[in-house]
Image (cartoon, rainbow, N blue to C red):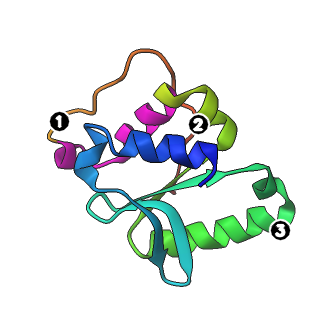
Amino acid sequence: MTPPEKRMWNMLRQEPLQALHFRRQVPLGRYYADFASHEARLVIEIDGVTHATDEAIFYNASRTAFLQSQGYRVVRFTNVEIMNDLDGVFEVILDAATPTRLGFADPPSPQGGGRTALPDNP
């Protein structure tokens, strides 16, 4: 795993996200999701610099469309976001997760950090 993937994995294994039972390298159709929670129907993708090419952008759009067709929400973060604003990443994941799965009426907001990425969801 890359350092951003390790950092994400450690965060996903902590409360309250632990309740969503995220898994790594989850096969979904012909793709592998970086992290997925079947319970929350949520996929988290981590994009490095190689994801900025036209070819990668097209591939990621196709991949996201497939995952959404399977009932998953897709949230993407860059390596930089994970390494520099983990509180913001945490907030976005909580917002994207089904609040009832976490036992909250409304998702809590951690101290610091702001919204760093928007879910790839129409």
Q: Amino acid at mark 3?
A: Glu
Q: Amino acid at mark 1?
A: Phe
- The span shown in magenta is 88-102
Quadrant in the rendering for residue 39: bottom left
Element under disc 3? helix
Sequence-first tag of 1 and 2: 2
Within 10 Å of the Cα at label 3, are there few (<14), some (14-19), or many (20+) other Cα atoms? few
Q: Amino acid at mark 2?
A: Ile
Q: Please give the residue where the numbered disc 3 appears in the rendered image.
A: 55
Residue appearing at x 85%, y 62% in the figure: 54
The verdict on residue 93 being magenta is yes
Residue appearing at x 34%, y 62% in the figure: 41
Numbered marks: total: 3
- Which mark is drawn over residue 104? 1
Q: Please give the residue where the numbered disc 2 appears in the rendered image.
A: 82
In front: mark 3 or mark 2?
Answer: 2
Quadrant in the rendering for residue 57: bottom right
The verdict on residue 90 being magenta is yes
Given residues 65 and 52, the one toward you in this image is 52
C-alpha span from label 1 to label 3: 40 Å
